[in-house]
Image (spheres, rainbow, N blue to C red):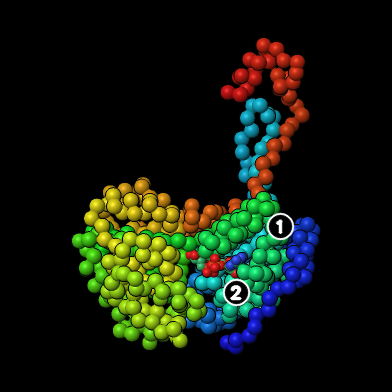
Amino acid sequence: MNKMTPHLTTEAEMHADLARLRATFASGKTRSLDWRRGQLKAILRMLKQEEKAIIGAIQADMRKNWVEAYTSEIAAIRKEAQYALKHLKKWTAKVKVPTPLLAAPGKSWLQPEPLGVALVMTAWNFPFHQSLTPAIAAIAAGNCVMIKPSEVSENGTRLIAEIYPKYLDTDAIAIFQGGPQETGVLLEQKFDHILYTGGGTVGKIVMTAAARHLTPVTLELGGKSPVIVDKSADIQIAARRIVWAKTQNAGQICINADTMLVHESIKDELVRAIIDHLKKAYGDDPQKSPDYARIINERHFDRITGYLGNGGNIIHGGRSDRDDLYIEPTLVEGLPEGHKLLTEEIFGPILPILTWSKKEEVVEYVTARDKPLALYIFGTDRKFEDYILANTSAGNVAINDLMLFAVVPGLPFGGVGASGMGSYTGTQGFVTCSHFKPILKRGKRMDLDARYAPYNKKKEKTMRFAWN
Ligand code: NAD
């Protein structure tokens, strides 16, 4: 793909786009279920017709292999759009609730209604998934959407700007292209909801800007997701799945295993198994493997490789090549407390290893830190599993695997505490992008006299009864 200077949305274009989206929303066009279905189907059509271009852009940015690129940037989005289409009628239906005696006779219900114009801001590691998944939720709920992809995934973002307007209704869906400076101006505008995916530092900027307009936010952030391996674990399964997760997109995934906490009695065996599985998957030199991805750019390459050194022993890997943006899958142990590999989100193919002997140490380690986006437990001891689940908090949990909760449509994906707030997937995504307007419709027939002045003892008694 050719390197071209990306078009940056000018302020004038941004204002024109926003005015158009607001006018479209006010016209009621996006409230119609036909419009929503039409847009969701257009997304499905786009994924089908542009599959090659989308995978090409992803490969140009990160050299992801076909399976990875297809799974996350085509299949997962398609599932999300299909799920929304399948549930749209049910989601948009009134939700009846009982009416108490005080308001009887009457009918009460919740009426889902769209919020208005939503802003979708994305990170760079899954440009299509992170722009379309929240957009699907916003569209299903009947909103207009301004999509701001990350400037870092250059090829992905360029393709987004090129193809989304070809398939989607440009009266209701617009693309904003820009980096931090341009986005600062965008964030000064009033939106009705912001769906943000990215790091916590920018998350705070987004939330601060949103607060000025009292705009609600959904923040999908990151953090350090631990993988806890108990002595009861099946070592081969744990090793194979940890290797799978840690090497996907060369570790540049928010829910990746960021630190491995393994029972001391099985550490050596697990490490040997991890090295074995790494070799099976990528050979002796992963740089030569067509299946191993690259780091997105020099800045992130320097950040990740900069974590190595200053203490700790590299027990496997450690090679890198800046010209090729390649970092070998690397295992590090013996890290001193406070080492960057233990304090910063790695977002790369390095796995720090810590050991423990008592389960309380694991809980102490996890709870002393920010609540992670994901927590993983490998083991067959149910008591251990229950203990960890009951005593820790995390956005999402997988037991005996990693990351796959993200493919279960009934499990809303999202963080907690420093790893985020809210969710934009599945049914929860529709809820996030809607206001469930509570409505009471009274009948004329009966009127509880006791609510009207002048009051007396009898009315007091009636009210006491009515409130029970
Ligand atoms: P980032 O925080 O640098 O950027 C995210 C977005 O914010 C981009 O669109 C960028 O253009 C914009 N931005 C950057 N600086 C800005 C500024 N000063 N003002 C306004 N906007 C600004 O994140 P990233 O490097 O793109 O992604 C990596 C982070 O995202 C990691 O922490 C990772 O865990 C997290 N992430 C989370 C999820 C999730 O679903 N929870 C998914 C992917 C990535």
- SS for callout 1: loop
Q: Quadrant of the N terminus?
A: bottom right
Picture residue at 67% right of the left edge, 69% below the top:
182
Q: Left of 231 or right of it: where is 138?
A: right
Kindly identify the residue that appears in the image at 43 percent across and 54 percent down: 371
Question: Quarter of the image holding residue 261?
Answer: bottom left
Q: Position of residue 248 (x, y in %)?
A: 42, 73
Disc 2 CB within 8 Å of nearest ligand 1 atom = yes
Which residue is under mark 2?
151
Kindly tell me whether residue 300 is visible in this rendering: yes
Residue 392 image point, x, y percent: 38, 50
In-image side of 275 versus 458 (left or right): left
Q: Which residue does the image show at 56% across and 75% down from the upper left? A: 152
Q: Please give the name of the residue rendered at 54% of the width and 72% of the height, measured from the top-left corner.
A: 124
Tell me the kind of residue under disc 2: Glu
Please state the quadrant of the image where ligand 1 appears.
bottom right
To which residue does mark 1 refer?
Answer: 190
- Crowding near pointer 1: few (<14 within 10 Å), some, many (20+)? some
Secondary structure at badge 2 equals loop
Give the crowd class for mark 2: few <14, some 14-19, many >=20 residues within 10 Å: many
- Residue 321 image position (x, y, % from top left): 41, 84
